[in-house]
Image (tube, rainbow, N blue to C red):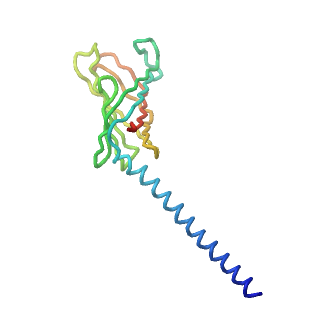
Amino acid sequence: MCVVERDKTYVLWRCTIVLAMFCCVFIIGSNSLGKSRTESGICSYEGSYKFIHSKRIAAGSRCKFSNGANVSRDSGYAILEAKEEGFSFSGGQGARWHVQASCRNPESLTVTIRLENRGCRKEVVSTAVSSFTAGDDGEIRINPYEITWTCGERSWSCDMIETWVLVPELW
């Protein structure tokens, strides 16, 4: 009878240890898988993304949008191009915004806007730096950045706070 009790205890402990090892391997594996999708998976994403581009006039600017508001939002579609070092896309009104990001450093994201506004005599380019986050579902959020809209020297200028949300199109 003692032998039977000892065998049950031995089997119970052995099963518990095997189960604990399995759980550890599963948890470690799922954490590293999620991390690699977030860090390097974004570079492999390409194709059509729906974007929402929000613009807010920064405090202290005397500008208004054509409808008199301080906030503007537009949406559309952009083609995300994967590159070895990151990704890029163009979007917004007339694809005037060009965004370039580094997957190796999510804190490094450059936004460039070509300003060819009605009142401008020449094309002006403004640049800002931001960062982004990527979700496991492929959604990309570009964090708020401040960029100056202007026609150039000695002309009007507006400081804008802009953000982007990109959602992959599912076919």
Quadrant of image for the C terminus: top left
Q: Is residue 147 left or right of residue 31?
A: left
Q: Nearer the viewer, residue 56 or 86?
A: 86
Image point 42% across, 32% down: which residue? Answer: 164
Where does the image place residue 12, in percent across and percent down from the top left? Answer: 67, 75
Q: Nearer the viewer, residue 11 or 66?
A: 11
Which residue sits furthest left?
A: 122
Where does the image place residue 87, in percent across and percent down from the top left? Answer: 32, 42
Image point 43% across, 19% down: which residue? Answer: 61
Where does the image place residue 154, in percent across and percent down from the top left? Answer: 29, 17
Q: Nearer the viewer, residue 150 or 34?
A: 34
Quadrant of image for the N terminus: bottom right
Image point 44% across, 42% down: which residue? Answer: 133
Where does the image place residue 34, in percent across and percent down from the top left? Answer: 47, 53
Query: Residue 114 occupies which quadrant of the picture?
Result: top left
Q: Nearer the viewer, residue 7 or 147?
A: 7
Q: Is residue 125 left or right of residue 165?
A: left
Image point 45% across, 23% down: which residue? Answer: 56
Position of residue 62 relative to residue 163, above or below, is: above
Query: Residue 110 occupies which quadrant of the picture?
Result: top left
Which residue sits furthest right?
A: 1
Q: How many marks?
A: 0
